[in-house]
Image (cartoon, rainbow, N blue to C red):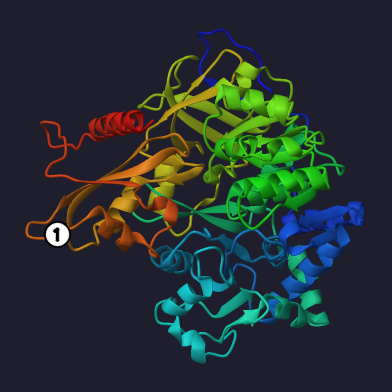
Amino acid sequence: MTTRAPSYAPSYAHGTSGTPLLGETIGAHFDRTVARWGDRPALIARQQDVRWSWRQLAEKVDAFAAGLLALGLSPGDRIGIWSPNNAEWVVTQFATAKAGLILVNINPAYRLAELEYALNKVGCKAIVTATSFKTSDYIGMLTTLAPELATSSPGNLHCSRLPELRLVIQIGPEPAPGTLAFEQIYDHRSTVEHASLAEIALRLQFDDPINIQFTSGTTGQPKGATLTHHNILNNGFLIGERMRYTEADKVCIPVPLYHCFGMVIGNLACLTHGSTMVLPGEGFDPLATLSTVADERCTSLYGVPTMFIAELDHPEFASFDLSSLRTGVMAGSPCPVEVMRRCIRDMNLSEMTIAYGMTETSPVSTQTLIGDSLEKQTETVGCAHPHVEIKIVDAEGRIVPRGSTGEFCTRGYSVMLGYWNDAERTTEAVDRHGWMHTGDLATMDADGYCNIVGRIKDMVIRGGENIYPREIEEFLYRHPAILDVQVFGVPDPRYGEELCAWIKVRAGATLSPEDVKSFCQGQIAHYKIPRHIRLVDEFPMTVTGKVQKFIMRQQMSDELARSATRTA
């Protein structure tokens, strides 16, 4: 916690702490957790009727890790996981860490173009994939990209579009041609591979990369933020410390595991405290979440504000006993005051915390403290995390006085190694002094608490999902009828923001908003498809020829507001 400073003090703070960082790998810490709390519940996956103790989970993890080694994977190899939340995701996370494999998180909403890019960017040698989920036919998409699967022996794929990929592991009872069922991997282990695991554990270092998560960029394709054991194990540990987790806590995790929110704030916070990971379903469902909290007597609940709103407003909300709850994390976008009041009053979340961060910082840099005022909980994103430095700087990189607006920067153990195979963009994000430049505009008060007031990068946050318009623009440029396109965010009562695209059509071509959405379907994630599309002749420009997105945003916001008034 930071100490109060006079208002003229610089916007710099560091999280002092008497709690030392963990100097070990995830696998080593996993073994210590099992030794200490082996018979206590580790994982509950409601939709699968899974209820494993830490010792039972360890048996699965070790067997799966040994099986991956037996199939020819080696420490440092990249293995993707493309799946909604399930027990297999958790097993894969810990098994890859023990085997020294770099887990590559692939958004379950990704479609063909995004999947192909992600697998090839980091050179995935294997992928663990779900069969399907909602409208996503994962096996169908993989076979579209790799038709060679149909005639390949499992583990020996040779595909022109995915040249590094050799092994496809399918979650589900009946593997498609060329794939191995997830359960089969356990059977590939032998005493030789188990001995290899022990030898690998001695060689692995906590500064080794162990996880790659894709973050969209303001220009170009997504970047693979590369995180170490030290990054994410300690961030999970210190998040749990701030919420006072013990082995008695049960943490309801309705947020996606592919994101840091699920796998770090969720799974690793539990691992480091012997707490129970509770998955209410494959994807977020307010009724399933409420039912899980009540039935399992969960003590902690996670979500973005829209998730808590959906739970609070559910018609059956009053029928659930939520008295077991005490704490949790709300993150992803600002929390409205009334929503926090309702969480405290109606969900018993008297010790709820607000967290802020980004994938590149493992993710949390600031978090509110248990006991903070409602004002701090709703008007700030907390103070510096333990062992983390934060500062707010102007455009020239100079620290601004407290209360002034500038760019939020952070430095410490939590900053990523860099973007995978992208030294140029790594240098743009992390300066020579080790400061991660977030692109977010913030202020710091006299107590060291920060408030995020805007974004330098033109990012859109839709229901907790970060979307960078440039990525969508570059995809839409592929359409032969599109001459020019500008994508930006507009206010939305449900998701906070929605995407809007203004499009200039090529002379002689015809295009409708429906055509644009059809072009996006199956190629980019559903949440990246612009909801509002306008076909225009010109964009508002400055005299120097710079597009003025803020004018477009204001015009669309006014138009949508008028439309909502007419239909109210």
Residue at image position (37%, 38%) is 457
From this viewpoint, is residue 264 visible? Answer: no
Residue at image position (76%, 59%) is 27
Under circle 1, the secondary element is loop
Which one is in front, 67 or 100? 67
| Location of residue 535 in the rendering, given as x and y in whole percent from the top left corner | 19, 47
| Location of residue 187 in the rendering, given as x and y in whole percent from the top left corner | 76, 82
Residue 339 in the image: above or below residue 212: above
Residue at image position (30%, 29%) is 562
| Location of residue 350 in the rendering, given as x and y in whole percent from the top left corner | 74, 26
Residue 499 occupies quadrant: top left
Residue 244 occupies quadrant: top right
Q: Residues within 10 Å of mark 1 (few under 14, many from 20)?
A: few
| Location of residue 553 in the rendering, given as x and y in whole percent from the top left corner | 28, 34
From this viewpoint, is residue 81 visible? Answer: yes
Tell me the quarter of the image containing the N terminus. top right
Residue 127 in the image: above or below residue 473: below
Q: Is residue 492 left or right of residue 390?
A: left
Residue at the extreme front: 567
Residue 5 in the image: above or below residue 134: above
Residue at which label 1 appears: 510
Which one is in front, 341 or 551? 341
Q: Amino acid at mark 1?
A: Thr
